[in-house]
Image (cartoon, grey):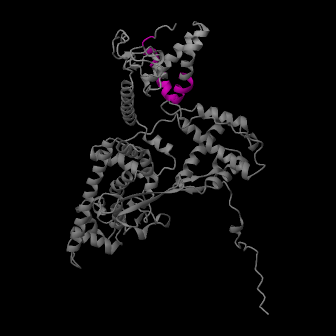
Amino acid sequence: MPAQRARMNRLLPRATSRAATRAERLDAPRCVRRTVIDFSSLPLPADVKLALADAFWNHFGARSPQQILTRWAYVRVFIRFAVSCTSLQSMADIHNGLLMRYVEWLNAQCRANGEPWTKSSRSSAYTTLRMLLQWLVRCRPGVLGDLHFPFNPFPWRNRDSRRIQKLCARDLRAILKACERDIRALHALREQGERERAAVETGDSALSFGSLLKTIDQRYGGIMPPHKVLSRAGHHPVLVTLSRYGGAKKVEPCLYPRAESLLPYYLAILIHAAGNPGPIAELSRDCLQPIPLLDDRQLLVWAKRRAGAMQRRSFRSTDPFEPPALVREIIEWTRRLRPHVPKAICDRLLLFKGAHGINAWSAATAKHIIRRDFCPRHGLPYFSLSSIRPGVLSAFYRASGDLRQVKAVANHEQIGTTVRYVEAPEVEAQHRVRIAALQRAFLGHISRRQAEAEPVPPQGLPLRPAPTAAPRAPAVSMFGFDCRDPLAGIAPDTRPGELCINFLGCFTCPNAIITGDAASLARLLQARDHLRAAAGRIHPARWQAIYAPLLRILEEDILTRFAGGELAAAAHLQSKQPPLPELR
């Protein structure tokens, strides 16, 4: 008979200490990086503080520290509103009317220079509060009453936002050349340190550069101690030698990277990979992966948390200034720092020793060094990290002309995202040139076929007299749009030598090219107002037959393709346009 299985204890163990049994308050202060998030100190009613803290840490607590701090900043925006309105006394006061007043309050906020907040900033502040309240409705039933959220209070948030500034190809090449110069100088400095350290004999007490590096390795574990340690008794010879060779700023790059010496590597990888500044700053040590059957290439792999996917690009592994070689060099360079790194950042690739110890690289550190040291030293204009990725993708698109290839470089899921990145005046000008060339080729092909199909009159019959030749020259239509030849007969249902039937409204021509510059939009707005004004004085039958279709196409098809900001900028130029002739 088989032995009977012992009964499983299904009771969870209980904490024995009194401190463990006492539950921590939801609104207790917590430290994220160097910021203390304390809901208990907010000037809000007690039940509101507890509810917001519960929703905040359960809904946003698992995100990255930077995202948590961003959401906390938007929560503080709502706190400012709640203090100013003085109508939030309990959770029962959070209703649809309060949310509407919050939206109106956001619309009235201005910056220090008097400009209103962008629609994206207002929407992000409102969305953070809405997400917290929706979490409470979903996970804490009964805390809030019947709550209705305003529907789309900030429409077209992304369309009306200011376009991302892009670096041109010339500026990107200048930044890469500056990075290569710094990397070569750091190569030479480390090679010099290795040569001088190899030349020092064991036990040599000479105060040379090589002996200083060897002393730091043997006595201090390869890490330069703080100045207060070197100023103590017994460390005076090391301090004197260190001062002789330029101090810690000149000596430390021979051992491990400092913040300013790590910047050229970061910028070079960022430009080559066409990645986002944050994910590239958080590269891990195992970011290089081999490619089967391609021994001379390697994959650079990094995580993009916002997209929830891995990003990758392949590079030559033999080029000294492409990411694979730079990554291998950084891993070797940070070898002395690895044993002293905190556990939270031990897997990060970009490590450096700063004034407050060993730290991991971040985009904020890069911005500070770019403004303070990199740009002034190389004579470059200041640039933002966010302008690098769209600049690289635009350069790829101008070189290849293939959006799908650029989409693969950018690791985008939707090609519409790639289109927003590559939109630029230079790209639009290139599009106009390509479209014009295709139209010329198409029209030339049609003209040749019509000439070949022209009927030949039979023998003995006189030819039809040719119409009187009209002057053939470029002309300007009634609404201010250029026409190369209004007598060419290009538009449908028109014949050569006769005035084009679309000459009164060339923006409705199937072959029309309408650019997005302010002058063209101003002419479109002027034509719309001119047609509207003529509707009251022209016979209704003539209006419906001739002008009403033009106005309908203009209002419903053409002007709706442009953003509100573009139309507002063109409205200022509308009064400067020459007057249009009266419609009859």
Q: What stretch is highlighted in magenta?
A: 554-579
Quick one: which residue is furthest to the bottom in this view? Answer: 1
Classified by dominant secondary structure, the portion drawn in magenta counts as helix
What residue is shown at x 33% (from left), y 45% (from top)?
A: 172
Q: Quadrant of residue 43?
A: top right
What residue is shown at x 70% (from left), y 72% (from top)?
A: 17
Front in this rendered view, residue 531 or 517? 531
Q: Residue 76's spot in the image, x, y percent?
A: 60, 44
Q: Residue 166's spot in the image, x, y percent?
A: 39, 40
Front in this rendered view, residue 486 or 558? 486
Front in this rendered view, residue 66 or 466? 466
Q: Does the segment drawn in magenta span residue 556? A: yes
Q: Is the residue 29 above or below the residue 414 in the image?
A: below
Quarter of the image where the N terminus is located = bottom right
What residue is shown at x 56% (from left), y 19% (from top)?
A: 549
Q: Is the residue 337 above or below the residue 441 in the image?
A: below
Front in this rendered view, residue 458 or 583? 458
Q: Residue 397's spot in the image, x, y percent?
A: 39, 43
Q: Is the residue 359 above or below the residue 429 in the image?
A: below
In the image: residue 170, left or right of residue 347: left
> Residue 44, can we see it?
yes
What residue is shown at x 58% (from left), y 44% (from top)?
A: 74
In the image: residue 342, left or right of residue 322: right
Quick one: which residue is furthest to the front in this view? Answer: 460
> Residue 275, can we see it?
no
